[in-house]
Image: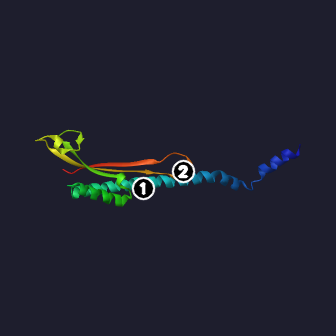
Amino acid sequence: MTAFPALIRRLRQDERGAMAIETALVAPVLILMAVGSFQISSLVARQTELQSAAAEGAAIGLAAPPESQADLNTVRDIMKASTGLGNEDVTVSMVYRCGNATARVTDPTSCGSGVKVWTYMNIRLQTTYSPIWSKFGIGSDISLDVDRAVQIS
């Protein structure tokens, strides 16, 4: 019986291997934090890339207002090239506001005669970001959407 308390006393005083045990406890937490930080920074970088592409499309629309569907397709193609998105993920369209109305319409002739028609170019970019932890069943894909409306006239 006296051997057990002596063993406990000796183990309590022996500090060899303490660093290995501490590292084994702390390392997984540090690794998870590093991976999480990397994933969050990648998500923010992708969102910033989409915002920059929308700003680029808005600048093009202001510099050379689109007059046809071909012009809108050109703006869309430029944004697709800068983001790597597909046709279904990038939408560029024209909408109109009749006079002082707050609602926008897709057909300017619906405003009636004698009403000032304001022209807007709508830009929509959408994609999903799949963080690495979603592959392990933790969380899900994150939807990234950027909507921008630019008043052309």
Q: Are marks 1 and 2 in contact (CB under 8 Å)?
A: no
Task: Name the mark nearer the viewer: 1 or 2.
Answer: 2
Amino acid type assigned to the residue bearing label 2 in the image: Lys
Distance of mark 1 from mark 2, alpha carbons? 20 Å
Mark 1 Cα-neighbour bin, 10 Å: few <14, some 14–19, many ≥20: few
At 31% from the left edge and 59% from the top edge, which residue is drawn? 77
Mark 2 element type: helix
The residue furthest left is: 114
At 45% from the left edge and 47% from the top edge, which residue is drawn? 142
At 60% from the left edge and 51% from the top edge, which residue is drawn? 29
Please report whichever mark, 1 or 2, sits nearer to the chain's N-terminal start: 1
Mark 1 element type: helix
Q: Where is residue 100 in the image (x, y as percent from the top left)?
A: 18, 39
Q: Name the residue under label 2.
A: 135
Q: Mark 1 points at which residue?
A: 45
Left or right of 7? Residue 64 is: left
Q: Position of residue 40 (x, y in %)?
A: 48, 52
Colouring:
rainbow
Who is closer to the viewer here, 85 or 56?
85
Amino acid type assigned to the residue bearing label 1 in the image: Ala
Who is closer to the viewer here, 17 or 118?
118
Q: Where is residue 141 in the image (x, y as percent from the top left)?
A: 47, 48
Quadrant position of residue 79: bottom left
Mark 2 Cα-neighbour bin, 10 Å: few <14, some 14–19, many ≥20: few
At 37% from the left edge and 54% from the top edge, which residue is drawn? 50
Q: Is residue 116 above or below residue 64?
A: above
